[in-house]
Amino acid sequence: MHDMDHRLLSALRDCGTDPRVAAAARALSRAGEHGALWIAAGLAGAAVDRERRGAWLRGTALTATAHLASMGVKRIVRRPRPGDHNGVAPLVRTAGRHSFPSSHATSAAAATVAYSALRPVGARLVPPLAAAVCVSRMVVGVHYPSDVAAGAALGALTARVGAAWMNGGSDA
């Protein structure tokens, strides 16, 4: 697993040598920092979709909760971020030293599950954007593929566990 993780990271990080790919990966990584993109999307959904405002706000809360859970797991696991392997430095600075699980992937997957359940447009727009954010973390060289996979699993699980609460509460 360790070798596969390193090989996949190296291949994806090599994509970042193209300036256009690097710029896109940096922008996606910055947008996903601290779940900001997904929290903003949930708040926008709540502002626009008055019928489901409460569900949007609860979905946003689930997304933020998933992000916080990933930060807690990072403090326990304490896996170091990929170093300058093969002499290639990361393309972005990070908020912390630990990589497992990817908090970007956690919040992206939570938003995908939560927001896709609320509107068809969410089911069409969120998943590809979430996938792009996840891949960007490897292209910029700050997460191993297993970090991203674990983060996505944690985010999806958090949103699935909270789905009844998200959809079942009163939407006042």
Image: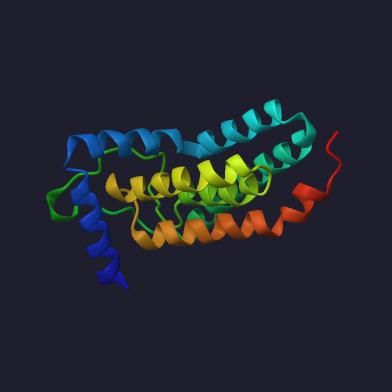
| Up-down relation of residue 61 to residue 70 (above or below) | above
Q: Quadrant of residue 63?
A: top right
Residue 134 at x, y percent in the picture: 41, 49
Residue 9 place in picture, x, y as percent: 26, 57
Image quadrant occupied by the C terminus = top right
Residue 125 in view, yes or no: yes
Viewer-proximal residue, 52 or 138?
A: 52
> Where is residue 78 shown, x and y percent of the image?
43, 58
Give the residue at the far top of this rendering: 47
Residue at 26% from the left image edge and 62% from the top image edge: 8
Question: Quarter of the image holding residue 10?
Answer: bottom left
Q: How many marks?
A: 0
30 sits to left or right of 22: right
- Image quadrant holding the N terminus, namely bottom left
- Report whether 10 appears left or right of 115: left
Q: Is residue 10 placed above or below 26 in the rendered structure?
A: below
| Residue beneath the point at 33% across and 58% down | 144
- Residue sitting farthest toward the bottom: 1
What colouring style does the render use?
A: rainbow
Which residue is rendered at x = 35% and y = 53% of the image?
143
Q: Nearer the viewer, residue 45 or 136?
A: 45
Q: Is residue 141 visible?
A: no
Residue at figure coordinates x 68%, y 27% from the top left: 48
Question: In the figure, is residue 82 to the left or right of 61?
Answer: left
Residue 12: image x %, image y %? 25, 53
